[in-house]
Amino acid sequence: MLLTLARSRRVICFGGKGGVGKTSVASATALAQAQAGRRVLLVSTDPAHNLGHLWQCRLGPQPVALRERLDAVEIDPDATVGAHLDTVARSLRRLMPAHLGGEVDKHLNLSRDAPGMHEAALLERIAELVEHGLQAYDLIVFDTAPSGHTARLMALPEMLTAWTDGLLHRQAQSRRFDTALRNLARDDGHGRRVFDSERAPDTPEDRDQAIRGILQRRRERFQHLRRVLADGGTTAFVIVLAAERLPVLETIELHAQLARAGIDVAGLVVNKRTPADAGVFLRQRHQQEAVHLDTLRDALPALAPLELPLLAEDIVGEDALARLVELLGAD
């Protein structure tokens, strides 16, 4: 199920409760597709940085080759916010009068820890990776942060597109107002046009155009990301969970949150399923897990979960991932 799903998509996102094995399943899926000859970009948005630990290498914001046809990126939220604000600062200093430089710095320093700043900056980076990644790779695999963060992130493209539209509208209104003011200006007798109540604004017309261009580009990037995520033929969202009460209930809630955001969940992976033939204790545990999985099937009857067994060893390195690929291929 999972590998078939991945073969037919350009983007696949793995989400779910923390600690259920999203990074392992995402990495195994990416490895399987690379082994099949596709160029794959594996992206972690989880600040825990488990992806680099699993592959036993140092990853960062730029693609690093893990093996032939498989690159990986690990997004650091704090570094992403810093880079985002640096970009904003450069644009503002270029567009604003020089004497307002101090106010720009003050505003951005206050914005660094503002509510939603991390999510907005992260979304900008994800949108950029999707935009460029779809040109350079056959498949992008996202290993996302825990459920609540992911649900908010999936809803952000539409929200930020609407917010940017509002900025564009207000900027257009401001430009019309500036034009009206200039039409009301009079000559001061020295060849300069001034206003009766205020001095003429020193903002050049090309500054307005530059601001509008930045906002338009931002809107286009969010709109593109929104289209990609909402297109079930392009993107698949897979929830990874453990066969336990809280992960099952969180999966049901995440499914509902994604549905409200217009994101279709294409698959479920039940990871670390306890064996039923390894002693009385584990058999009882297996039976308890079955009760929770019945709850999952009752709530989401259209999705048949893929069950992966609990393994005796930790999954670390490509060899261990290759064994997990074999289990994924057994579906």
Image (tube, grey):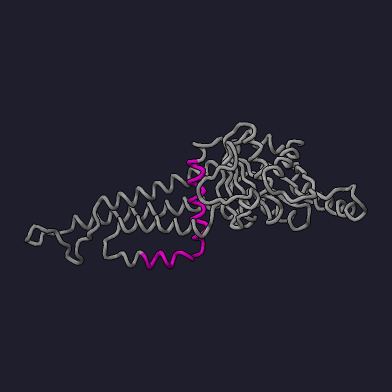
Determine the residue positioned at 93% across, 54% down: 280
Confirm whether the magenta stretch covers residue 125: yes
Determine the residue positioned at 45% across, 59% down: 82
Q: What is the magenta segment's predominant secondary structure?
A: helix
**182 or 321, which lies in front?**
321
Determine the residue positioned at 47% across, 50% down: 161
Q: Tell me the magenta residue range.
A: 105-132
Whether residue 158 appears in this view of the structure is no
| Position in image of residue 77 (x %, y %) | 53, 57
**56 or 311, which lies in front?**
56
| Position in image of residue 324 (x %, y %) | 73, 42
Quarter placement of the N terminus: top right
Confirm whether the magenta stretch covers residue 122: yes
Height in image: 88 above or below 24?
below
Does residue 262 appear to the left or right of 86 in the view shown?
Answer: right
Quarter placement of the C terminus: top right
Does residue 297 appear to the left or right of 226 in the view shown?
Answer: right
Determine the residue positioned at 51% across, 64% down: 115
| Position in image of residue 210 (x %, y %) | 31, 50
Does residue 277 appear to the left or right of 146 in the view shown?
Answer: right
- For this orientation, the residue located farthest to the right is 280
- For this orientation, the residue located farthest to the left is 189
Whether residue 250 appears in this view of the structure is yes
